[in-house]
Amino acid sequence: MKMKLAVLPGDGIGPEVMDAAIRVLKTVLDNYGHEAVFENALIGGAAIDEAGTPLPEETLDICRRSDAILLGAVGGPKWDHNPASLRPEKGLLGIRKEMGLFANLRPVKAYAPLLNASPLKRERVENVDLVIVRELTGGLYFGRPSERRGPDGNEVIDTLAYTREEIERIIEKAFQLAQIRRKKLASVDKANVLESSRMWREIAEETAKKYPDVEVSHMLVDSTSMQLIANPGQFDVIVTENMFGDILSDEASVITGSLGMLPSASLRSDRFGMYEPVHGSAPDIAGQGKANPLGMVLSAALMLRYSFGLEKEAAAIEKAVDDVLQDGYCTGDLQVKNGKVVSTHELTDKLIEKLNNSEARPRILQ
Ligand SMILES: NC(=O)c1ccc[n+]([C@@H]2O[C@H](COP(=O)([O-])OP(=O)(O)OC[C@H]3O[C@@H](n4cnc5c(N)ncnc54)[C@H](O)[C@@H]3O)[C@@H](O)[C@H]2O)c1
Ligand SMILES: CC(C)[C@H](C(=O)O)[C@@H](O)C(=O)O
Ligand SMILES: [Mg+2]
């Protein structure tokens, strides 16, 4: 298979984890006889510095003529005091919206070798395998007006707006995912307070009639945040609006032992997608070779699965991650008992070794 990929490393640890993902991807594509053309593009702070805008038109052009996008992370203290239109995050929100990527899948899986790396009790996190389906192009992030106002700028407004269609399509997506998983869906809202959540719940109830085999629960976001820590094993698929999903996914990362472990896929109704880790640019460790590349590497695996239907290749990457963790290798963010802490580059070398060992390689190449 031939693929054209847009590569947007971004800021902070973005380029470090992207380098790891590309090395891993090249190895697996090579092993299975696929060809990829990688085209780099600017986004976030790096784009502000070089092109004067967080999302240059050229970046959008490159993305539009690609089959999928890989994105590292954006942001950092250097740009934190910029005006709203010149913030790195604006580039990320812009590309999600421009490309129509409304469905953000954030899988959260407990890896056996990392069970003791979570601050939660082992028996709570064991066997956790859930997916947060986050609405990505609506809600508070995009509602207008969103501004400071009043004569002295001492009043402020953000708007949480959704249309019926926007809610319907994300809830459909979540039901479809639940149907091919363990058939349990938690629709998370704040229907006791917000009108938007009441419509969300109404649509979730209507859609449920089309999926009688899926067990649906409606949960309030505050108690969900508690349940996610107290009893994460109860969840299969969680669907929720943009900001709730942002917050719940960082919280859920604690189950895995580190925010650096979580991948994500941002999808629409065709096969196009953007693949990025859940974490940010981690300015506190940027440039030190300490970044955990696994969230980014696992995002590349999701790309192979969702945008290209390459299940074996995606599974090969996921197995390499499992195997390397099983051997005790990790980066310093993971508090693994007796863990062998290595650098981003060294951990990537270990992944590549696993992918190239005779067992993992496709039979045809042995
Ligand atoms: N998708 C994105 O591009 C994205 C996501 C979240 C935050 N951000 C941006 O990143 C900047 C920093 O935000 P923050 O500090 O709140 O969140 P962050 O996710 O960058 O970091 C939070 C903590 O987790 C650690 N961490 C995160 N990813 C890691 C990894 N791969 N390996 C090891 N440790 C990791 C960091 O060192 C830090 O201590 C901000 O500008 C924010 O807007 C970007
Ligand atoms: C950087 C920020 C705009 C972004 C978000 O809030 O969506 C991030 O936190 C994420 O989770 O991808
Ligand atoms: Mg976030």
Image (cartoon, helix red, strand yellow):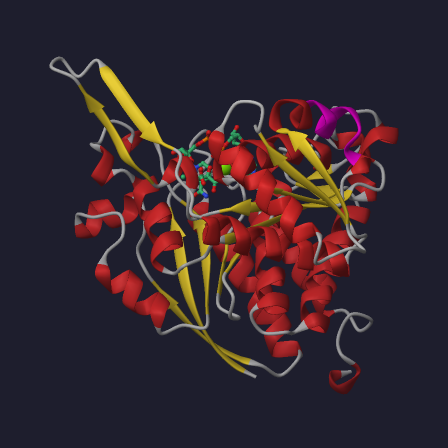
The residue drawn where x is 52% and y is 66% is 269
Q: In which quarter of the image is ligand 2?
A: top left
Q: Where is residue 18 in the image (x, y as percent from the top left)?
A: 48, 54
Count of numbered tags: 0
Q: Is residue 264 visible?
A: no
- Name the residue furthest bottom: 364
In the rendered structure, the answer to whether residue 57 lies left or right of residue 333 reads: left
* Vertical arrangement, residue 353 with respect to residue 183, above or below: below
Q: What stretch is highlighted in magenta?
A: 226-232
Q: Can residue 81 be seen in this view?
A: yes
Q: Position of residue 83 (x, y in %)?
A: 20, 32
- Name the residue furthest right: 123
Q: In which quadrant of the rendered image does the C terminus lie?
A: bottom right
Please identify the dominant SS of the magenta region: helix
Q: Where is residue 200 in the image (x, y as percent from the top left)?
A: 55, 40
- Name the residue furthest left: 151
Q: In which quadrant of the rendered image does the N terminus lie?
A: bottom right
The residue drawn where x is 56% and y is 69% is 307
The residue drawn where x is 27% and y is 52% is 55
Q: Where is residue 23 in the image (x, y as percent from the top left)?
A: 55, 63
Q: Which of 36 and 30 is in front in this view?
A: 36
